[in-house]
Amino acid sequence: MSKTILKQSVRNNYKIWLVITLVLCLFLTMIFAAFNLRDTGEGENPISFTILTLLTTSFYGMIALIIPMIYSIFVGNRLIAREIDSGIMSSTLNTPITRNKVIITKAVFFISSIILMMAVLTLVGLLMDSIFNTDLDISTYLLINLGLTLYSLAVSGIVFLSSSIFNKSSNAMALGAGLPLLFYVLALVASLEDSFDFLKYFSLNTLFNTTNIVAGSNYIIPFIAMFVIAIGTYVASVICFKNKDLPI
Amino acid sequence: MDIIKIENLTKDYGQNRGVFDLNFSVKKGEIYGFLGPNGAGKTTTIRHLLGFSRPDKGNASINGMDCWLKPRIIQEKLGYIPGEMALPDNMTGGKFIQMIAELRGLKDMTFSNELIKRFDLDVKTNLKRMSKGTKQKIGIVVAFMHDPEILLLDEPSSGLDPLMQAEFIDLVREEKSKGKTILLSSHMFDEVEKTCDRVSIIKQGKIVTTINVKDIEHRNKKTYEIKFASLEDLKKFKTLEFDVIEYNEEKSRVKLEVCDKDINLLINSLNNYKIDYISEIKYTLEDYFMNFYRGENK
């Protein structure tokens, strides 16, 4: 770990982190507010869905996946591939700082920034629950957020690995952004059309299944799988970056 | 003692690009010049010395340590000016210099401040708004500030104005007098001639020729241009025996190569003719190497 590189990473990326986190929390807040204003349908047909149902169908199915993904794609690309492509990594590596130190520091920054984002999101949700009195099932809510954190870390790992493999920012972007988006689309198609159901086996998104989490079944192994993917991609990034030729 | 050593270094990028079975070494306190057209393999060689590239074959070593395996230890004593200064765009020059010093663990900024003053560098400007020359000055400060034993300079004075180029040449000479070992890649013959002890020309990844700069300075053969007042004089003169390298009837002019010991012979013989002028054409490194640049000598 290098304190200087950590500082530099924070300086370069705190703005996009703030914007993304803010947007994410705004969406969450809006959903709590919308639930609070809902037509409770008193009388003949009481509508009996909970805040958790609304959250899993509207928020955790799309917005909570895509918005942190955008953060990962931009920041992951900027941390390595863009510095190699533009050549500015040269001045960092022309010091006694090793490649290992550079990439590990950047990985720690990236992982921490995502965990922090998810922590803020979770706290904002808990805060909204107490403000709007929405009677949230807190343990399930925390479990869903843990799943989202693991999913986002796995996505960030994919972007980070792609950023470590390619020396051209555009190539790193193509794989790093393309793969998570492809996973998203495959999961979407699989859920919409029964005959394409098999596609879900080719998507990371299948591992983050809110229905299973709410039902309290079959979520532990997918969680472990996402954790392994995250660790695996980050470790592969370090190995790859350490051993490749740098055109700088 | 060889500080920088390149042994059988091969890195093939395909299409004849890269370096092929390259061998050379730089002794302690020596300035070694590296000349060659664009894409000849100069930067590729330097990349290996920095530990950025893994050789296909052979190896690059500094102070006896393999550059690919021991970059950390080597980098402590190394200063490098890249061929193309790529700097972050969100900080001032001063902040950047400070950051590199932090990465190096350098606390004593005396020499850095001296260099900033010497090269008249405005450190308050944002890097993004700096001209090429100013960025190059940043590169100079960053490469020299920790007083490294070894310097790798890749076209270090590109973008500098003539005044600063001269200042830079002075700096390099001073560092040499301190016993620094320097590898200088350049296109500027003048710079190389003024600083280097030995010069190699590299082309298509191979060293074509190596020369001691002193041999060029102290050649005992000189070239003279003689303009005669009339063509008749020139025609008569032709019969005498000197090495004629250019013969121009139109301008009644001749260029001769004359050994120093024969110079009186030339002057005496010229007595018999009416001449407009005689002037020595200084033989420079450029003349020597231009042939190789153009690819006439293979």
Image (cartoon, coloured by chain):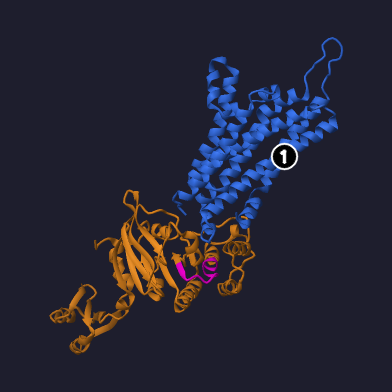
Numbered range of the magenta stretch = B140-151
Vertical placement of residue A139 versus B197, above or below: above
Q: Quick check: can you spot residue A244?
A: yes
- Of the chain colours in the picture, the one used for chain A is blue
Residue B145 colored in magenta in the image: yes
Q: In x, y percent, where is residue A77?
A: 56, 44
Q: In x, y percent, where is residue A89?
A: 53, 54
The residue where tag 1 is placed is A119
Specify whether B227 is left or right of A40: left
Q: Residue, x 70% and y 43% (percent of image)?
A: A116
State the residue lying farthest toward the top.
Answer: A44
Vertical placement of residue A145 versus B224, above or below: above
The residue lying toward the viewer, choosing from A9 and A148, is A148
Q: Quadrant of the C terminus of chain B?
A: bottom left
Vertical placement of residue B54 versus B35, above or below: above
Count of numbered marks: 1
Q: Residue, x 73% and y 28% (percent of image)?
A: A140
